[in-house]
Image: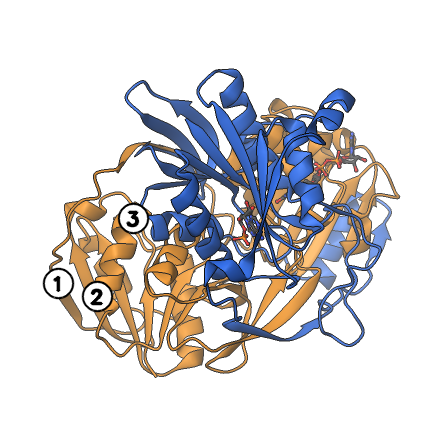
Amino acid sequence: MKVLVIIEHDNETVKQSSFSTITAAKEISDSVEALVLGQGLDSVINELKKSDHLKKIYMIDNELFKNPLAENLSNAIQKFAEGSDYTHILSPSSTFGKNMSPRLSALMDVQQISDITKIISDDTFERPIYAGNAIAKVKSSDQIKIITVRSTCFEPCALNSSVDVESLSVNLDTNSSVSFVSYDKSKSDRPELTSAKIVISGGRGMQNGENFRLLEGIADKLGAAMGASRAAVDAGFVPNDWQVGQTGKIVAPDLYIAVGISGAIQHIAGIKDSKFIACINKDEEAPIFNFSDYGLVGDLFELLPKLEEKL
Amino acid sequence: MKALVCVKRVIDYNVRIRVKSDKSGVETDNVKMSMNPFDEIAVEEAVRMKEKSQIQEIVILSIGTDKSQETIRSGLAMGGDRGILVKTDKEQLEPLTVGKIIKAVSDKEKPDLIILGKQAIDDDCNQTGQIVATLLDIPQATFASELKKNDDNTLEVTREVDGGLETVKVNIPCVVTTDLRLNEPRYASLPNIMKAKQKKIDLLEIGSFGIDIKDRLQVLEVNEPPERKPGIKVDDVEALVNKLKNEAKVL
Ligand SMILES: Cc1cc2nc3c(=O)[nH]c(=O)nc-3n(C[C@H](O)[C@H](O)[C@H](O)COP(=O)(O)OP(=O)(O)OC[C@H]3O[C@@H](n4cnc5c(N)ncnc54)[C@H](O)[C@@H]3O)c2cc1C
Ligand SMILES: Nc1ncnc2c1ncn2[C@@H]1O[C@H](COP(=O)(O)O)[C@@H](O)[C@H]1O
């Protein structure tokens, strides 16, 4: 068995989810290789080279992959994998992996296994369905397994190695029917939501975007990432990539603090694997209390300033 | 332009899911079913484009049991023009199979725009739109939060990605999958629900497509998720900080 990991990066740094995907790959086989596609990959490769468990890194540095267009990526990965002996191709279950990997599976006529949370054997996996209200154990009969990995379920690999790198070229026409226009990157000095040790999120109860300042002070003190419920994002309080939940980001920090969030199943789906959950809500009947290790009933506008002061 | 909108009948998002005791799946008997919420957003977007005269015809497609006709009717009541049901007795089909059927229907219907939800809230797969685009060899714009039609037969689509918003330009024909912020779906009015009853739904048998619908992914068992230990309520901020520091040891 031989596993290929598709690395997600931004041409500068490797995404944490890639290191988690390497760990998942290692659970399947000792023979793990990585493929990086991008442009100007020096710093990415320098970082990735240190990954434990990798036997080899292949890189394709080409203008074609400056922006991660799924059409170009999936075609190149298929060409690379064609005629090789990979039994598994893994990508992180981020918007990058979700966008690209099903294309690869269609090109290879494989039924992808989305968002695995556990590896039972080389062909059997667990994945959540119905917003995590049920866990399916599935067995694939495809020759090659194409998988996306929920990164919060696998620790990032350690970085104590020095892996061989081979640079390849690619013979591929640009897909002329799709082009990149722009990327509006949300700026933040905070840790990434999906890998932060502490996450503090606000919901509709915050009332407006201004009031998220009350959470910022606490996030600053705790070095926490900031998130939100769908209602807070829909109302325009905060950017879309803050949404935590079934159809947003899945987080699993040591501590998740939910403020002014009722605890709808779609939100819970994204936070259930947190080690500890604390909440502040003025409605003692709110479902969030059923999922919280520590619940505080009260008005957030009174309680948040006190919390910041006590930390 | 002609739009093909793909809609799936799923357990309503408000229903509390119960896993069957024999672990074969989740309980669907006497459970409220609805159109997948992301597909409502897909229908709504097509209808808005039709209202702007960017689209002339909206075809609503579902692959499922006879009951999926209800789901198609909901789409027709929102403003779809006609429906297609590809009938099967199988309760769940895999995305790859569904993708192949949608491709086959598209080969015949030749839509300019195929709109799907980004994710079905039952299987949570997030695959079908990408598969359809690949099989048809047309571009994809997934997780769309804004669609703009240009005069030169292209679409500019803003996409919700992990780090922010990405905008791509795709040639028509193309596949779009919807994210939550694209629009807020309308409720069908009573007169429109009545009118939808007169609209045509073509019924096709899945067997007539000559596509192998056998599962590649066998579901061995379905289990309840592990439960979280019940927590406690604390009296005040001090007690909370104390617990987090000394009991949970996370601060
Ligand atoms: C297809 C689909 C996908 C979805 N995906 C997601 C998802 O990924 N993530 C997600 O979060 N949701 C998702 N949702 C939405 C979800 O169902 C809920 O609507 C949403 O999570 C509610 O957000 P909320 O808790 O902020 O708002 P509400 O439910 O309105 O709760 C607000 C809470 O704030 C409390 N509050 C108000 N004022 C104060 C105050 N002054 N002090 C203290 N507490 C206060 C209230 O008591 C209440 O409990 C999805 C829904 C659908 C249909
Ligand atoms: N049986 C089906 N019939 C019609 N459309 C479907 C079906 N299954 C999935 N889709 C479409 O594909 C989208 C994504 O589904 P999935 O890949 O299963 O998460 C859904 O939102 C629908 O638009």
Q: Residue at x 30, y 52 (%)?
A: A13
Marks 3 and 2, how far apart in space? 15 Å
Chain with orange colouring: A
Marks 2 and 1, how far apart in space? 9 Å
Residue A51 coordinates in the image, percent (x, y): 31, 69
Q: Residue at x 18, y 46 (%)?
A: A64
Give the residue type at disc 1.
Leu
Label 2 chain ID: A
- Judged from the image, the secondary structure of the residue bearing numbered disc 1 is strand
Check disc 1 and report the residue beneath it. A168
Q: Residue at x 55, y 48 (%)?
A: B119
For discs 2 and 1, the disc positioned in front in the rendered view: 2
Q: As displayed, is residue A71 above or below residue B1?
A: below
Taking the image as drawn, is residue B226 in sight?
yes
Counting residues from the N terminus, which is met first, the one under dot 2 or under dot 1? 2
Give the residue type at disc 2.
Phe
Which sits in the foreground, B108 or A242?
B108
Chain with blue colouring: B
Classify residue A243 as left or right of residue B71. Answer: left
Q: Residue at x 31, y 48 (%)?
A: B137
Counting residues from the N terminus, which is met first, the one under dot 3 or under dot 1? 3
Q: Are marks 3 and 2 on the same chain?
A: yes
The label on residue A71 is: 3
